[in-house]
Every structure is written in structure tokens, then in C-alpha cells.
Amino acid sequence: MEAKEQDVSLGANKFPERQPIGIAAQSHDDGKDYKEPPPAPLFEPSELTSWSFYRAGIAEFVATFLFL
């Protein structure tokens, strides 16, 4: 029983730094090899004048109609 307690105490002291669960794999440095693009706007008024906007709406309507 003594050897088991010794193994447990050795394992507990193996990693002295304490971190909350779930952040061990996260790094706080900017070690990324890519740059994230800025967020796209949700709606642009220029979309209302393009045919592809209406074509996508019609396609969504037809697909939903056929699905139901």
C-alpha cells in the first residue's frame, strides 16, 4: 500500500503548474500560421439589386416546397 501512495504523490508532483480543466491545449501566444479574416456583415443593401440574391431565394422556396 505504501508503494501505491508513493506513486500517487510522485504523479501529483510531476506537473506543478495548475490549470483549469479544458485549457491545457490552448496557447496564449499568436503562433498561428494564418490570419483570420474580419467578420462579414450580415446584410448589405447592394444585395437587393443582384439577380443571384433572388435566384437563391427562389431556389430555397422551391426546395422547401418539394421537401414538404
Image (cartoon, helix red, strand yellow):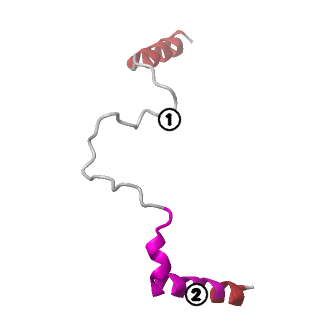
Query: Helix or strand or loop: what does disc 2 sit on?
Result: helix
Q: Within the magenta stretch, is there residue 51?
A: yes
Label 1 or label 2, whichever lies nearer to me, is 2
The residue carrying pointer 2 sits among few (fewer than 14), some (14 to 19) or many (20 or more) residues within 10 Å by Cα, namely few
Question: Residue 10: image x %, image y %?
Answer: 43, 15
Quadrant in the picture for residue 65: bottom right
Give the prevailing secondary structure in the magenta stretch. Answer: helix
The one nearer the camera, 59 or 54, is 54
Q: Amino acid at mark 1?
A: Gly
Residue at 39 percent across and 20 percent down: it is 15
The one nearer the camera, 35 or 52, is 52
On the picture, is 40 further left or further right than 30?
right
On the picture, is 55 further left or further right than 37?
right
Give me the C-alpha separation between circle 1 and circle 2. 42 Å
Question: Residue 60: image x %, image y %?
Answer: 61, 83
* Residue extent of the magenta highlight: 42-61
Residue at 57 percent across and 12 percent down: it is 1
Question: Residue 38: image x %, image y %?
Answer: 36, 54
The residue carrying pointer 1 sits among few (fewer than 14), some (14 to 19) or many (20 or more) residues within 10 Å by Cα, namely few
Quadrant in the picture for residue 66: bottom right
Q: Amino acid at mark 2?
A: Ala
Residue picked out by circle 2: 59
Up-down relation of residue 9 to residue 19 (above or below): above
Q: Within the magenta stretch, is there residue 41?
A: no
Up-down relation of residue 7 to residue 57 (above or below): above
Sequence-wise, the earlier of marks 1 and 2 is: 1
Residue picked out by circle 1: 22
